[in-house]
Amino acid sequence: MTKRKAVPKAKKKTPRSRKGLAQSEFGRLVGCTQQRVSQLAKSGVIPVLPSGRIDEFAATPAYVTFIKRTPDEAMKRVREARAKEIELRVAKERRELISLEDVNYAVGMIASKFCGELAGVAAASTRDLGLREIIQTNLSAAILRFKASLDAVTDDAKAGRPIGDDDAEDEDED
């Protein structure tokens, strides 16, 4: 029988994990960029060695846990946004919801016709030119107040603020 030749023992290398990986190396390992690894390290998701390098045996499970948790939160927001979009689309199809531009156009048309009708009130009311001028002045002031109120309501609607007439509420309380 022949003796086996002794195989020389390999030199012990310090495992790479003791030194840790650079952020770019860990990024390649888990499939993300060095910048993303840096963000995760700064936020405490990935543990960092005192040398600033990353221990892949500690960081990989932490990263996997983070990834498992994150899509659920993101998907929840996506599902909520899709549900809201569908609700709005259905409301619009049912004619429960109309565009602000359509409302502004309709109200503007009605207001214009109303102001046109008021313009003839003074002449139809009297032949006395002095009295006509007083009536027309009062009507013009009322039209300007109406226009200012309409503009304020339009601005509130565009800004998403509640629409309400504070003057009408005060009159109801009397």
Image: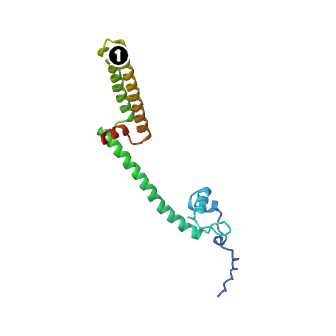
Using the image as rendered, state which of residue 127 and residue 152 is in the foreground: 127
Q: In the displayed structure, does residue 63 sit left or right of residue 142?
A: right
**In the picture, which quadrant includes the N terminus?**
bottom right
Percent across and percent down for residue 45 are: 56, 64
Label total for image: 1
Quadrant in the picture for residue 49: bottom right
Are there few (<14), some (14-19), or many (20+) residues within 10 Å of tag 1? Answer: some
**Residue 121 picture quarter:** top left
Question: Three-letter amino acid code at disc 1?
Answer: Leu
What secondary structure is found at the residue carrying circle 1?
helix
Residue 53 sits in quarter = bottom right
At 35% from the left edge and 16% from the top edge, which residue is drawn? 131
In the image: residue 172, left or right of residue 27: left
- Which residue is pictured at 68% across the width and 68% down the height? 51
Residue at the image point whose x is 35% and y is 26% from the top: 111
Relative to 161, say whether 31 is above or below: below
